[in-house]
Amino acid sequence: MSSKKGILIVISGPSGVGKTTLRQKLLTQFPEMKYSVSVTTRRPRKSELNRHDYVFVCMKKFKKDIEKGRFAEWAEVGGNLYGTSKNFIENAINSEYDVLLDIDVQGASQLRKLYYENGVFIFISPPSIDTLRNRLNLRKTDSEQEIDARIMLAKNEIKESNSYNYVVVNKDLNKTLEDLSRIISSEKHNKTNRK
Ligand code: 5GP
């Protein structure tokens, strides 16, 4: 009987570091890879689509899902709740699909315990805090106060980066994409051949 499973590619990093763009490009490069669409209580931003970017739910529904054990991990980030569907990732990896996740450091730490064998944990770091602040300003999605809060959060997240398998500094998008593709291809190869 085959015990082959897909792998989880977990990407974390501060808000504004470029994770969304990198994620979209990676999914184009690895079309067979599935993206884990998170559930959140946060309000949708203008460009976001329900079930594509996130599954947007109210607090009551999120809490019910916690009670029912529907999340592989969940966490509060910046005052909103975010969670990963356990069913989705289990079904995908059991069907030998690789899954890409964009989750925060708390969620990654929970998944590290559950999917130690099958997970690759990658932290995307900004070249500096100043660059991150500039990117958040350019994005124009947050108020100055929200940006300050995100910067404070980013500093704490960067402290956690040493528990990841890889830290990639996103200085140049194409170079970062190359690094990520190389990591994913090699981990896919290693983890698949180990079984
Ligand atoms: P944003 O609101 O900017 O889309 O995301 C805020 C933070 O929540 C980001 O660091 C993102 O990686 C994280 N996040 C998104 N989905 C999940 C999830 O399902 N679980 C956890 N723990 N964090 C998530």
Image (spheres, rainbow, N blue to C red):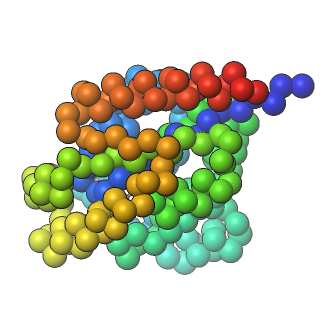
| Residue 164, position as x, y percentages in the image | 48, 49
- Residue extending furthest toward the right: 1
Q: Front-most of 68 and 2?
A: 2
Q: Is residue 6 left or right of residue 32?
A: right
| Residue 123, position as x, y percentages in the image | 40, 48
Q: Is residue 142 left or right of residue 49?
A: left
Residue 102 visible, this angle = no
Q: In the image, is residue 36 above or below residue 149?
A: above
Quadrant of the rendering where the N terminus is positioned: top right
Quadrant of ligand 1 in image:
bottom left
Q: Residue at x 33, y 37 (%)?
A: 22
Q: In the image, is residue 62 above or below residue 10?
A: below
Q: Is residue 74 left or right of residue 141?
A: right
Query: What is the count of numbered marks?
Result: 0
Q: Front-most of 177 and 93?
A: 177
| Residue 57, position as x, y percentages in the image | 48, 66
Q: In the image, is residue 33 above or below residue 87?
A: above
Residue 166 visible, this angle = yes
Q: Residue at x 65, y 47 (%)?
A: 116
Quadrant of the rendering where the C terminus is positioned: top right
Q: Front-most of 39 and 183?
A: 183
Q: Residue at x 28, y 65 (%)?
A: 155
Instruction: Determine the image quadrant of residue 29.
Output: top left
